[in-house]
Image (cartoon, rainbow, N blue to C red):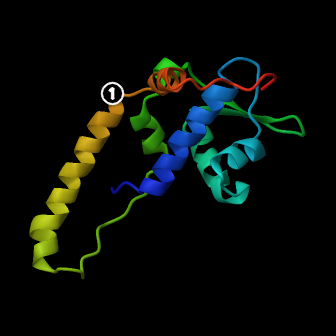
């Protein structure tokens, strides 16, 4: 199973945005607003919202005043769980280097993937919120 970097980063960015702007309380972050803040098309990120919701990481509320909020406390949301929710089964291409690919690059990629997963398991959304605070970022009034 290989990590799709763009999808993984989008999932982490969505979770951080929801945590920063809505938290776990009664407030909701609208999907369109999240997409705007990420500079992404809502249609493009909708599958990521769905994956995060199916994984039990986001709660969704439908309707005109609907949106998303965290399904768990920020300290319980590990980046490895977020990334796992959007992982896709994929095999490295076999035709690029033949035996070199199979004997060298495939195992290397699996090692790197395992190291990344291990590192992500040690970081939570709460850690990222602390980084935002240390960077001087504040929620907009009324957000």
Towards the viewer: 4 or 52: 4
Q: Secondary structure at mark 1?
A: loop
Q: Quadrant of the C terminus?
A: top right
Decide if residue 74 is on the left or right side of residue 17: left
**Residue at image point 42% right, 57% down:** 4
User: Total number of numbered labels?
Assistant: 1
At x 9%, y 68%, the residue is 103
Can residue 130 be spotted in the picture? yes
Residue identifier under label 1? 122
Q: Residue furthest front?
A: 136
Q: Quadrant of residue 96?
A: bottom left
* Up-down relation of residue 92 to residue 139 (above or below): below
Q: Residue at x 29, y 43 (%)?
A: 116
Q: Point out residue 59 in the picture as x, y percentages from the top left corner.
A: 67, 31
Q: Is residue 23 above or below residue 8?
A: above
Specify whether 38 is left or right of 114: right
**Residue 56, can we see it?**
no
Q: Measured from the top left, where is residue 36 in percent x and y?
A: 72, 48
Q: Horizontally, is 3 left or right of 40 in the view?
A: left
Establish if 105 lies above or below 70: below
Q: Position of residue 46 (x, y in %)?
A: 67, 52
Mark 1 Cα within 10 Å, few/some/many (few <14, many 20+)? few
Task: Residue 113 in the image: state x and y as whole percent.
Answer: 27, 49
Q: Nearer the viewer, residue 126 or 46?
A: 126
- Quarter of the N terminus within the rendering: bottom left
Q: Is residue 70 above or below residue 101?
A: above
Which residue is painted at 71% across and 59% down in the image? 43
Q: Residue furthest right?
A: 64
């Amino acid at each position: 199973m290989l990590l799709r970097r763009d999808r993984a980063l989008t999932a982490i960015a969505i979770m951080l945005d929801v945590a920063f702007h809505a938290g776990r309380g009664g407030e909701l972050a609208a999907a369109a607003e999240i997409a705007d803040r990420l500079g992404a098309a809502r249609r493009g990120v909708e599958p990521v919202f769905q994956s995060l919701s199916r994984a039990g990481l986001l709660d969704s509320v439908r309707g005109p005043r609907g949106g998303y909020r965290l399904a768990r406390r920020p300290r319980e949301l590990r980046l490895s769980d977020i990334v796992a929710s959007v992982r896709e089964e994929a095999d490295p291409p076999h035709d690029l280097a033949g035996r070199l690919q199979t004997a060298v690059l495939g195992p290397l990629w699996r090692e790197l993937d395992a190291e990344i997963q291990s590192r992500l398991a040690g970081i939570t959304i709460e850690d990222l919120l602390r980084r935002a605070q240390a960077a001087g970022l504040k929620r907009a009034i009324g957000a």
